[in-house]
Image (cartoon, grey):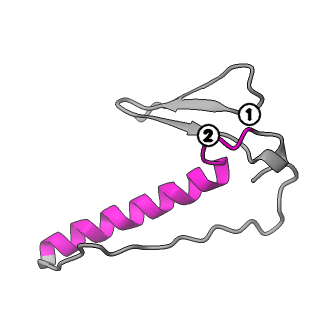
Amino acid sequence: MISVKAHIEQQHYLTQIAGANNEITSDETLDSGGTGKGFTPSELLASSLAACTAITLRMYADRKSWDLAGKEELVYFRFLTQPKNHG
């Protein structure tokens, strides 16, 4: 089972997120009332998809002996309707 803890204090939306071995900061943009000091929740979702895709590609490339050095992928995430006050 995967467990993640989110901790929020007084700085409006600024949130510290901790997994088993790592931490990351999430926040809303300035125009959404946040401090802009971390990934927005939408960016975190897109980041998880990008990381999963890149890691899967790496696993496949390793089996096929393909060189992926310096390759990048770009993930676009778009809401069908933009939620209010969310970046």
Dot 1: within a 10 Å radius of its alpha carbon, few (fewer than 14), some, or many (20 or more) residues?
A: many
Residue at point 49%, 55% (across, down): 48
Quarter holding residue 35:
top right
Q: Is residue 85 left or right of residue 58?
A: right
Residue 73 location (% of width, % of height): 43, 73
Give the SS element for disc 1: loop
The spot of residue 56 in percent (x, y) is 32, 65
Which residue lies under the disc numbered 2?
26
Which percent across, then down, holds residue 72?
Answer: 39, 73
In the drawing, what numbered circle is on residue 71? none
Q: Which residue is mark 1?
A: 13
Residue 53 percent location from the top left of the image: 40, 66
Judged from the image, the secondary structure of the residue bearing numbered disc 2 is strand
For the stretch drawn in magenta, what is the main secondary structure? helix
Residue 18 counted in the magenta span: no
Region in magenta:
35-63
Which of marks 1 and 2 precedes in the sequence?
1
